[in-house]
Image (spheres, coloured by chain):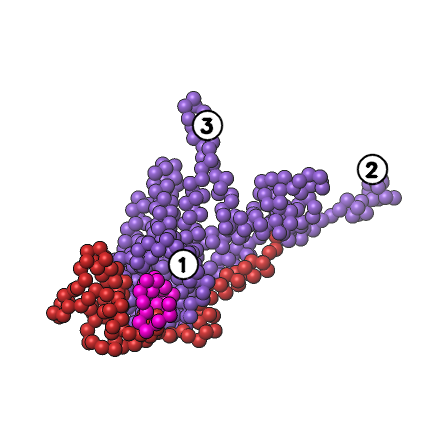
Chain colours: A red, B purple
Amino acid sequence: MRDNGKIYLGLTIFLILITFPIWYNLATGKAGYAPELEKAVKGEDCVRDSAYMSANHMDLLNEWRDQVVRDGERFELLSNGTTVERSLSNTCLDCHANKDKFCDRCHGFLGVDPYCWDCHVIPGDHTP
Amino acid sequence: MTILISFVTIVMLILLVMAGVGVGGWRVLFGTVIPYAAIATFLLGFIYRVTLWARSPVPFRIPTTCGQQKSLDWIKPSRLDNPHTGLGVVGRMALEVLFFRSLFRNTRSEVREGPRLVYSADKWLWAAGLAFHWSFLIIFLRHFKYFAEPIPAWLLTIEHLDGFFQVGLPVVLATDLIIVAALTFLFLRRVVDPRLRYISLVADHFALFLLLGVALSGVYMRYFAKTDITRVKELATGLLSFQPVVPDGIGLVFFVHLFLVSVLLAYFPFSKLMHMAGIFLSPCRNMANNNRARRHINPWNYPVKVHTYEEYEDEFRDVMKAAELPVEKD
């Protein structure tokens, strides 16, 4: 049976679908975009180095949550001698004050939607 | 032996990329050159294979009939198992492609005491195959979020549903567990059953190990050795917009994942994985069974020079008459 027309039509549809990101990025014109994070409003050093933080901050937050909520260990002595409270709202957001310009930049870029804010208060946001 | 060859090949590939990026520092090679080559091989190879198939003759209409054929009006036809319309074929193919309907009918034969031959339903291959293929599709679609900017909302819906149970951080995605479990089953199936072990080839085990390698390196990267995925997306969108960059801060595990995916893409068009396109071209499934309603002439029929009886008689009428042979026309 001569069905070449249908076969090539199917092949064309497949090729268009599989290369979807190329067309999509051409249409939106945002290819090569990379989010820039707002500098911390105060302090020089984070609680860990930035390479660790950018990849593993969720591990640290999880660890802190367990230590605070389950073991009651609220404070941590950093390697540089200072003591910090293990707290998202009071420590992290103290320096990285703007959630929109810090957390959400990468999370939005990568489609990550962590449920931190189901419980935690966003600083400066007073909507009930 | 076939298992060993496949396994060692995959281990060598992983060691190659680990040495190349980790020791040699060839990040541009493994981050851009090899992925580009792999994508090009995949696309061109895919087109080549399908074109080859499209050009090969299918002279006869040979659908497998698994139900009552369309007949007299008062006999109920089986529209999906013996389709006689284009729509029926689409339905049959959709069930085949999406739910592996013919594999659902899989049976196993065993010789029991007696001796007597026993047939029983065997749904394990169907279930594991379906679990693997659907998980792979969902994982594949999920990965579009690393290529598309801004991310379309429907992509995020898929991921939300995948991580429905919100276990752990980052959230455990159900398809990650299912794909590894299904691939493990599909591999063990070929090892445990002696008959299957006997007919398994390197190509069978290599494909399974390669897919398992891709899945496990992805799982390892998501849940254990995390890497800076903002940079990963920069690399991915850079690749697809033809402005390749290899940002710093991308871990070795990502290069292993990317390299295994590249190997998979390059291997795809030349392997049994091409059943992805081939299933649509199955001649026994993709044709309507209307042989008795319509006449189909083989379009590849060679133009045969025929000499009909009428012509024969015209040519030899006089001789035939002289020999007193009966003729149709005088």
Disc 1 marks a residue whose amino acid type is: His
Q: Extreme right residue here?
A: B330
Q: Percent x, y for residue B306?
A: 71, 49
Question: Which residue was labeled with disc 1?
Answer: B160
Dot 2 or dot 1, earlier in sequence: 1
Q: Most prominent secondary structure in the magenta stretch?
A: loop
B73 relative to B7 in the view: left or right: right
Query: Magenta segment range?
Result: A106-128
Dot 1 or dot 3, earlier in sequence: 3
Q: Chain of mark 3?
A: B
Crowd band around label 2 with a 10 angstrom C-alpha radius: few (<14), some (14–19), many (20+) = few
Query: Which mark is on residue B325?
Result: 2
Q: Are marks 2 and 3 in contact (CB under 8 Å)?
A: no
Residue for point 31% across, 59% down: B170
Question: Which residue was labeled with disc 3?
Answer: B117
Q: Percent x, y for residue B274?
A: 45, 54
Residue for point 19% across, 56% down: A71
Disc 2 marks a residue whose amino acid type is: Leu
Q: Which mark lies nearer to you, 2 or 1?
A: 1
